[in-house]
Amino acid sequence: MRIELATQPGVPGRRNEDFASVGGGADGAFVLLDGVTPPEDGGTGCRHGVPWFVGRLGGALLNLACGERELPLADCLSAAIGRTAAAHRDTCDLTHRRTPQATVVIARWDAERVEYLVLSDSVLLLADGRAVRAVRDDRIERLAALGPVTDAHRNAEGGFFTAAADPAVAGRAVTGALPRAAVRAMAAMTDGASRWVEVFGEGDWADCLTLLAKEGPQALIDRVRAAELVTNRRLGKRHDDATALYVVP
């Protein structure tokens, strides 16, 4: 196996709101989360904060994905959301629209197949040796094509969904499975790293996977940071938390 991971906060000294971890080996799994940063002028109803939330959710999700292999990934996510909510329901307002939340990518593999789940705007790449497939939940992108995306669209019918406090959102995720032999390599990125393709257009998804294979995840993040410094584009954040994970199972 080959596993490489790199992560970098958007602002030096500020806590990283991304989470990524890998468990197992020949029968393994990885989890990648991108915590949603609340606006500076608004609260979340939670005393703990986004880094605490993604650590709790990510740890629970990896534990379930690796330890409860008979459970579908959507059920693992549902249970992880429920466990995380239970850990702070008594101290925090989980009904707040900005309660801590995150995007989710999970992949799990064994000798027979590779399963995957994507919720919100992080991306999963799957390569079979000839082509690269990007697995994406494009709800935000489709909404943005129609007009401004607002908090009213968040975790609402007709909007987009993130892992927050409602276990039912796991049923909104993009899921699937492929034969193990059809997956030669995988990668997952938060949108702070996938900017290399989606914002700056430095290459396509196949180019991105080639970069990860040849130079590793930190090289991708370094190139994103370089592009952020010279761009004239309007970015929601000049520098975002960026995480990339590359796995050859």
Image (cartoon, grey):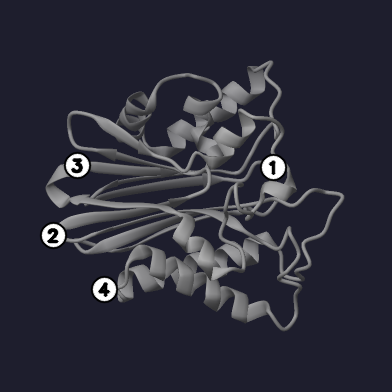
- Disc 1 + disc 3, Cβ < 8 Å: no
Identified at 63% across, 25% down, the residue is 228
Q: Nearer the viewer, mark 4 or mark 3?
A: 4
Q: Secondary structure at mark 4?
A: loop
Amino acid type shown at disc 3 = Arg
- Residue 184: image tag: 3
Residue 146 in which image quadrant:
top right
Q: Nearer the viewer, mark 1 or mark 3?
A: 3
Identified at 16% across, 50% down, the residue is 179
Q: Does label 2 or label 3 sit earlier along the sequence? A: 2
* Residue 62 visible, this orientation: no
Q: CA distance from mark 4 to mark 2?
A: 14 Å
**Farthest residue in the front direction?**
158
Report x, y in % for residue 48.
Answer: 72, 69
Q: Nearer the viewer, mark 4 or mark 2?
A: 4
Q: CA distance from mark 1 to mark 2?
A: 40 Å
Q: Nearer the viewer, mark 1 or mark 2?
A: 2
Say above or below: 121 vs 96.
above
Q: Does label 4 or label 3 sit earlier along the sequence? A: 4
207 or 96: which is nearer to us? Answer: 96
- Residue 226: image tag: none
Q: Residues within 10 Å of mark 2 (few under 14, many from 20)?
A: few
The residue singled out by tag 1 in the image is 11
Q: Nearer the viewer, mark 1 or mark 4?
A: 4
Identified at 57% across, 62% down, the residue is 54
Report x, y in % for residue 56.
Answer: 55, 70
Q: Secondary structure at mark 3?
A: loop
Say above or below: 119 vs 165.
above
Q: CA distance from mark 4 to mark 3?
A: 23 Å
